[in-house]
Image (tube, helix red, strand yellow):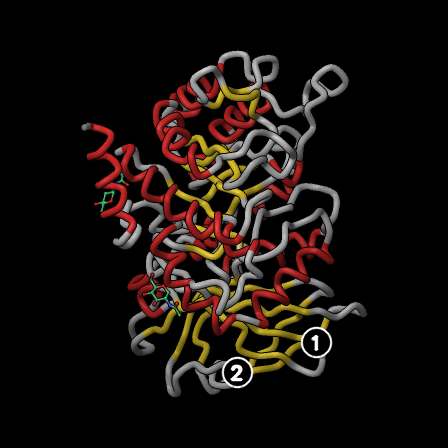
Amino acid sequence: MLRKTVLFLALVTQALMLENGLLRTPPMGWLAWERFRCNIDCDQDPKNCISEQLFMEMADRLAQDGWRDLGYVYLNIDDCWIGGRDASGRLIADPQRFPHGIAFLADYAHSLGLKLGIYEDMGKMTCMGYPGTTLDKVELDAETFAEWKVDMLKLDGCYSTDAERAEGYPKMAAALNATGRPIAFSCSWPAYEGGLPPKVNYTLMAKTCNLWRNYDDIQDSWKSVVSIVDWFVKYQDILQPAAGPGHWNDPDMLIIGNFGLSFEESRAQMALWTILAAPLFMSTDLRTISPQNMDILQNPLMIKINQDPLGIPGLRIFKSESQIEVYKRHLSNEASALVFFSRRTDMPHHFHSSLLDLKYPRSRIYEGQNVFTGDIISGLKSESSFSVVINPSGVVMWYLYPIKSQGLSSQMSRL
Ligand SMILES: *[C@@H]1O[C@H](CO)[C@@H](O)[C@H](O)[C@H]1NC(C)=O
Ligand SMILES: *[C@@H]1O[C@H](CO)[C@@H](O)[C@H](O)[C@H]1NC(C)=O
């Protein structure tokens, strides 16, 4: 009887928008995968293997080093945590590497004001070969995650057919809802269907998932970052309208703090992800991250822009022969963010433009701030020309808002 009620509710909720009220702004936190992968060798590499200890140490860093207070609250497990299923079919964590189980880790995260995310796969196995969530296990696994007090589920898509994913992802959304626990739902579904219509229906995505991976996994290189940016820009007319409060495109993790990016490239990834209204999931070793990389990731104005309540992703609005691109994101209270991005490989480039050229309204005066340097911008008229100096594979980023007249100035609209 109870089971029938649950199933009925599940069917009803499948027909509605995903209205779990979660992630009105893009999620921020830490995700293990890009940096720590499927390192399960705790004998050889006890500090870096996928284990309870690794997540507890990252939780401590998130709580103590300023991350949590800036909004980086998700502590997210990825693949390789599963030990198997017990006699009743319930998932269990690897008993050696997670001796106290996932519920313990969730309690630990909550005690520090963090949220815990977990990983499974809609299919026979996870991408690394651990037991997956087959269609008959969807409800059981959702109930298990809710019992453990998990706050987010990333559901990957390895080892399944198109048809299984088409049934499984909405089924999981309904099953999570039926648990009664608010659990944000991150879907890898579109990435497995090529990320584009007609195979991917982004209206359906927004009804099913809070965020979704559209494209390839990020790797620890600038080449990988650029390939992701290229793809999101090429299809921006499709992807930009797909995202908004409660439902986000996910170009994958931030690799800032690892090995593949220079200082300029690290700033560029941060700025471009912010313009895209992307989730900010760091995947780096927070125990050893440099102050310079912390500054990039902990820039309060950057985070304010990423977390703008309107949740409108930006667009590339300009591309020059000289390999300079301009990205623009509309923000609340008529504010906006601009990113000037250089794909050049020679030397710092002087780029000349005006706000009018960048599609701002005529006859207005703007002020704001350079997001990285903190330099104040004031009295900038739409028609006036300006120039910025952009380093190779680097960015200049501006936060701007109009002032009504020259009389009313910064006091009226403090950052
Ligand atoms: C389940 O869905 C309903 C209807 O969309 C919504 O009101 C409710 O908040 C959801 N509950 C959870 C736990 O997601
Ligand atoms: C996409 O999904 C929505 C919501 O489920 C549906 O109403 C719409 O018809 C679908 N569009 C296409 C082209 O299949």
Q: Residues within 10 Å of mark 1 (few under 14, many from 20)?
A: few
Query: Hey, what amino acid is under mark 2?
Result: Ser
Q: Amino acid at mark 1?
A: Gln
Question: Does residue 36 appear left or right of residue 249 in this picture?
Answer: right
Nearer to me, 112 or 226: 226
Q: From this viewpoint, is residue 114 visible? A: no
User: At 22% from the left edge and 33% from the top edge, which residue is drawn?
Assistant: 4
309 left or right of 295?
left
Viewer-proximal residue, 395 or 102? 102
Q: Residue at x 37, y 63 (%)?
A: 203
Q: In terms of image quarters, where does ligand 2 lie?
A: bottom left
Residue at the (36%, 73%) spot, across then down? 402
Helix, strand or loop at disc 2? Answer: strand
Q: Give the residue at mark 2.
A: 354
Q: Residue 323: which numbered mark, if any?
A: 1
Q: Mark 1 vs mark 2: give the one in front.
A: 1
Q: Position of residue 105 (x, y in %)?
A: 46, 20
User: What element does badge 1 sit on?
Assistant: loop
Q: Residue at x 52, y 39 (%)?
A: 121
Q: Is residue 265 visible?
A: yes
Q: Is residue 173 left or right of residue 197?
A: left
Dot 1 beta carbon under 8 Å from ligand 2: no
- The picture quadrant where one finds residue 379 is bottom left
Task: Point out the tag, 1 or 2, that comes first from the N-terminus.
Answer: 1
Give how far across and how far down residue 96 sits, in percent: 61, 13
Task: Give the CA distance from mark 1 to mark 2.
Answer: 18 Å
Q: Is residue 268 above or below residue 133?
A: below
Q: Position of residue 71 (x, y in %)?
A: 42, 41
Q: Is residue 10 left or right of residue 287?
A: left
Q: Quadrant of residue 334?
A: bottom left
The C terminus - image quarter: bottom left
Image: 149 above or below 290:
above
